[in-house]
Image (cartoon, rainbow, N blue to C red):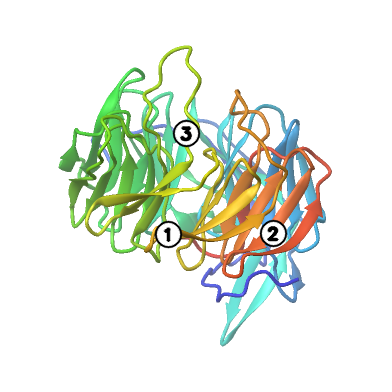
Amino acid sequence: MRTIPHTRNLILAAAAALTMTLTACGSSPAGDPGSPDTTQAQATTASSEKPVEVADVDPRAAITYDGGIQIVDTSDGTVVADIEKEGFLRLNPAGDGRHVLVSSAEGFEVLDLGMIVKPHGDHNHYYTTTPRLTGAVIAADKPGHVVTHAGKTAVFDDGTGTVTIFETNALEDGQLSPEELTSFKTNDPHHGVAVPLASGSVLVTEGTEDERHTVHERRADGSIGAESTDCPGVHGEATAQGEDVASFGCTNGSVVFRDGQFHKVAVPEAYQRSGNQFGSPDSPYVLTDYKTVEPVDGAEPEHPTRVGIIDTTDATTKTVELGSAYWFRSFGRGADGEGVVLTYDGKLNILDPASAAVTKQVDVVTPWTENENWQEPGPNVKTAGDFAYVTDHAAKKLHLVQISTGELISSLDLSVVPNEMTVIDAELKH
């Protein structure tokens, strides 16, 4: 079943055998945007597998389970690779439509999902290879957020406060050599995030392990441009339509970076946290969670039933009542900027951000509730093009929903209990 109806714009050259390099990334001194320390060990291995030409490539889902990562062909559920790896693993699209950054004890490891698109005049040729960990890794004490924007990918090491950035297309050979990486350190280690901009600047948080409220623009020369210090608990980001437009979650309403300045989003509540944000390059709206109860030690965590929609053009927000709760893995965005949210009642809610209204509801998974421990398996939503991919950990299923029609297309059996997931569709991300 063809599940990529839109035109591909990814250019990858990988017809030859691939070389895999293990690269441990150091960091430059604060304020130095140059290449990181290259003195750490490197190891090189080679793959003898040649890509196989195919008529088309269907999206592949990378799914973590207790003991490893399975890569599944979403057209029929075939397991194309099963990689044994211990520990709790997080999956982050690298942005090039082929690779995933796996957050592990080693840092950010590069996983090749083996989908290759090569343009040839007025048409493309498609190839596949067996998915594998390439051996490339950006070392990190506590691998945190991964953000892709403006043709660059930025990773944040919470353990050291180090930001590492590379041109997204540098991954075409599965390697990340030291000269392809630049890094800098924030003032203190913290749970932070960095967003690379087309201007060459980087939006980056500052704070400590105990408190953070600052996000600023760090220029290419290391100087500070625009800054907001009115973002307590800063967490979560999303980019939106327009050049260098981004939103960041705070506990007193979000902040939006637009036209080179930060703009505070006014909210009626004294406490309002939108720490999980989801954007689209084709929409000025950012979809968020919407919490209004300040956490208290020992109290039951809040399970909101409203979501937020931020209009980045004027830094305003609206809310949409869904009638059922959700969690941070419930969200996605469609090809036309639609919002999707999976709720406890098992429904996938499809939203029109412009009108702040639910347009469709699709019964998808078994009704569920959020785990007390967020690292335990639970439903997961990811989107690619016009499709939402939804895991049902209780039934060991992967469901495919067409967003524009609200139709449940297929339900695939899984051989493992799914936890984290990402879906890669051979499309270059913004």
Relative horizontal placement of residue 192, taking residue 127 as reference (left or right)? left
Going by the numbered disc 1, the residue's amino acid type is Ser
Residues under labels 2 and 1: Cα distance? Answer: 20 Å
User: Dot 1: few (<14), some (14–19), or many (≥20) neighbours within 10 Å?
Assistant: many
Q: Which mark is residue 144?
A: 3
Of labels 2 and 1, earlier in sequence is 1
Of residues 355 and 313, the one drawn nearer to the viewer in this rendering: 355
Q: Answer above or below: position of 114 versus 372.
A: below
Residue at the spot of label 2: 400
Q: Look at the numbered disc 1 and give the secondary structure of its residue.
A: loop
Residues under labels 3 and 1: Cα distance? Answer: 21 Å
Tally the numbered discs.
3
Report the mark closest to the observer, 3 or 1: 1
User: Dot 3: few (<14), some (14–19), or many (≥20) neighbours within 10 Å?
Assistant: many
Tell me where residue 151 appears, x and y as whole percent: 40, 59
Q: Look at the numbered disc 3 and give the secondary structure of its residue.
A: strand
Q: Answer above or below: position of 325 versus 151.
A: above
Q: Are marks 2 and 1 in contact (CB under 8 Å)?
A: no
Q: Answer above or below: position of 68 versus 301.
A: below
